[in-house]
């Protein structure tokens, strides 16, 4: 991790998480015409059922992401799947590898918490997200979640190997 990026575990309701969530919702409106309608409960991102993180550069919140266990989602032979939510990098901090760093952090912390598969939803209006996930070894999986019936929904998953560090 670059020396100038610090990732802290925070509550989903932490002020910096709220700030970045407001930004990402505005971006969803631009890209999809509406904010994300997925039901989100802050308690789902608290230990031991989930976690949420904010990344800081020079004390400024620039990236975030979280995961929550999804016992109702079984993909890629999972016993204990987690779902990534609210992966986001602020526009001023993009194109510097922060999304890849946050994704690796989410994978590592989910694996440590006992997850065996990581899944996520994105959409065709986010081609850079799809490219990131595909380049990180994610494969398309059967749709799940709130947007599962939407034609622009894209779901991805990846087995979390025990030998990964």
Image (cartoon, rainbow, N blue to C red):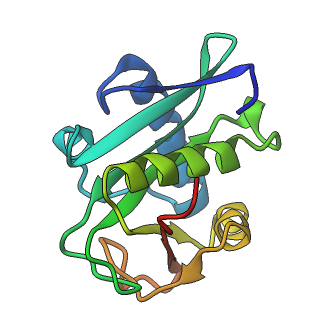
For the question of whether residue 35 can be seen, the reply is no
Instruction: Please state the horizontal and vertical placement of residue 93, each as a whole percent of the image.
Output: 75, 32
Q: Residue lying furthest top in this view?
A: 59
Q: Residue lying furthest front in this view?
A: 163
Q: Is residue 32 above or below residue 48?
A: below
Q: Is residue 41 above or below residue 140?
A: above
Q: Is residue 45 left or right of residue 16?
A: left
Residue at the (33%, 41%) spot, across then down: 51
Q: Residue lying furthest right in this view?
A: 95
Instruction: Please state the horizontal and vertical placement of residue 5, each as a whole percent of the image.
Output: 68, 24
Instruction: Please state the horizontal and vertical placement of residue 47, each as a whole percent of the image.
Output: 23, 38
Judge by depth and name the residue closer to the eye, 140 or 90. 140
Q: Is residue 29 above or below residue 131?
A: above
Judge by depth and name the residue closer to the eye, 114 or 63. 114
User: Quick one: quadrant of the N terminus?
Assistant: top right
Residue at the (59%, 74%) spot, across then down: 138
Residue 79 picture quarter: bottom left
Residue 16 picture quarter: top left
For the question of whether residue 141 can be seen, the reply is yes
Instruction: Please state the horizontal and vertical placement of residue 155, each as a whole percent of the image.
Output: 48, 77
Q: Is residue 162 left or right of residue 88?
A: left
Residue at the (38%, 49%) spot, across then down: 112
Judge by depth and name the residue closer to the eye, 69 or 59. 69
Judge by depth and name the residue closer to the eye, 148 or 30. 148
**How many numbered discs?**
0
Residue at the (76%, 40%) spot, across then down: 94
Q: Is residue 107 above or below residue 3?
A: below
């Amino acid at each position: 991790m670059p020396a100038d990026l610090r990732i802290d575990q925070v509550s989903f309701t932490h002020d910096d998480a709220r700030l970045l969530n407001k930004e990402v919702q505005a971006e969803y409106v631009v890209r999809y015409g509406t904010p994300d309608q997925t039901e989100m409960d802050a308690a789902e991102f608290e230990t031991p059922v989930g976690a949420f993180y904010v990344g800081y550069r020079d004390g400024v919140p620039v990236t975030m992401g979280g995961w929550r266990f999804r016992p109702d989602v079984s993909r890629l032979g999972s016993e204990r799947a987690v779902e990534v939510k609210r992966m986001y990098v602020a526009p001023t901090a993009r194109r510097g590898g922060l999304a890849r760093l946050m994704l690796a952090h989410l994978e590592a912390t989910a694996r440590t918490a006992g997850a065996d598969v990581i899944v996520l939803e994105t959409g065709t209006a986010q081609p850079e997200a799809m490219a990131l996930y595909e380049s990180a070894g994610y494969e398309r999986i059967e749709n799940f979640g709130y947007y599962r019936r939407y034609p622009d929904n894209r779901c991805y998953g990846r087995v979390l190997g025990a030998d990964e560090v």
